[in-house]
Image: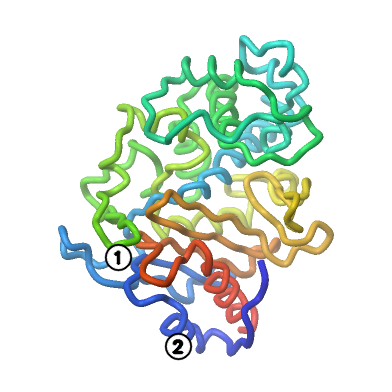
Amino acid sequence: MAGCGGTGGVESIEPFLDDTLPPGSSGALVAGRGDTVDVCRGWGEPDEGTGERAGCDTVFDIMSMTKQFTAAAVVRLGQDGLLDVGDPLAEHLPGVPADKQGVTIEHLLTHTSGLLDTLGPDDDPLTRDAFLREALGSELLSEPGTTYLYSNVGYSLLTAVVEEVSGQDYEAYLAEHLFEPAGMTSTGYVLPDWSEVHVAVEHDAAGRPQGTPLDHPWADDGPYWNLRGNGGLLSTPRDMFRWHVALRGDTVLADDARRKLFEPRVREEPDETYYAYGWVADDRDDPQILWHNGGNGRAYGEIGRDPAGDVFVFWVANRAAGDGWDLGESGTDLTSGLFERLSAG
């Protein structure tokens, strides 16, 4: 994630945001150093329907940034001695066919399983059983362990593994072992009481409201399986900072488990970046920033932290594109600029 020019320390954050956030966009962000929040606020116009402005406690779809939680769940299960990332997928899921007997948990974590990206639209009413049948019956695009191919299907398979190994529903496992220990009160699919909070309305590039994430088709227990575990979690900037603080210590993961989560492992060819477990690093040997992004055609966001956890940035826009601007294309400037200013003190 390239830098974006000069820095001026924390005092330059607000002028930087004024200059960088496109007119017409809206969203919220949090940025801080160590355990301290330096800025946590929304931007843009209030929602037309509710009249509420986005803020630190507004609920957003975090999209593919969900993958870090699925990866952390797998690593936590490993920490607790319930699986090993070197285990074959077939050790934890029934019905794995012969051509996928070589797929391991780590292959799924690093997008090197050879599985295709997706089986269809996020809101296809695909049940768990149907998803497993289609995913395991799909044709591999490469031999497992040989090629980086980003796969949402792979992370949904990891979601099924979490359920099989833990004996719990995926969201229930995350709530008990990740969210509650981290103090995250507004993160999940259906378990939080969303009626008590402001959930951001998303917009298309023309500025037309497209409803909140909860207005789109879901099953009673969360998104359908084309999305489950690879995207679609809802959270707030404040909760995402709590997650960052938890990852600075052993609240959720022990030191060795955190190192496994953050270690850059596979080059994202043709890019120069490397994939860890649910995180991306710019440099394999000396990563200065670990990050991930997410988008759904309406919203877009990014998360970034340094390996030591000294600097953290998270932002999400519920209107991510407009006339002449697209945060999906320019958002790295926002993340990098915040990161550099916090690093400069």
On the image, numbered disc 1 is attached to which residue?
54
User: Image height check: is 59 above or below 128?
Assistant: below
305 vs 235, left or right, is right
- Neighbour class for label 1 at 10 Å: few (<14), some, many (≥20)? many
Q: Where in the figure is residue 41, as x and y percent of width and height?
A: 37, 71
Percent from the top left, x then y, of residue 43? Answer: 34, 72
Q: Is residue 57 above or below residue 64?
A: below
The tag earlier along the polypeptide, 2 or 1, is 2
Where on the picture, by quarter, is residue 48?
bottom left
Q: Considering the numbered disc 1 on the image, is that residue within a helix, a strand or a loop?
A: loop
Residue at 69 percent across and 24 percent down: it is 140
Q: Is residue 245 left or right of residue 40?
A: right
Q: Badge 2 is on which residue?
A: 15
Q: Is 116 placed left or right of 223 in the picture?
A: right
x and y percent of residue 171 in the render? 44, 33
Quadrant (top left/top right/bottom left/bottom right) for the N terminus: bottom right
Question: What's the residue type where badge 1 is placed?
Answer: Ala
**What is the three-letter code of the residue carrying label 2?**
Pro
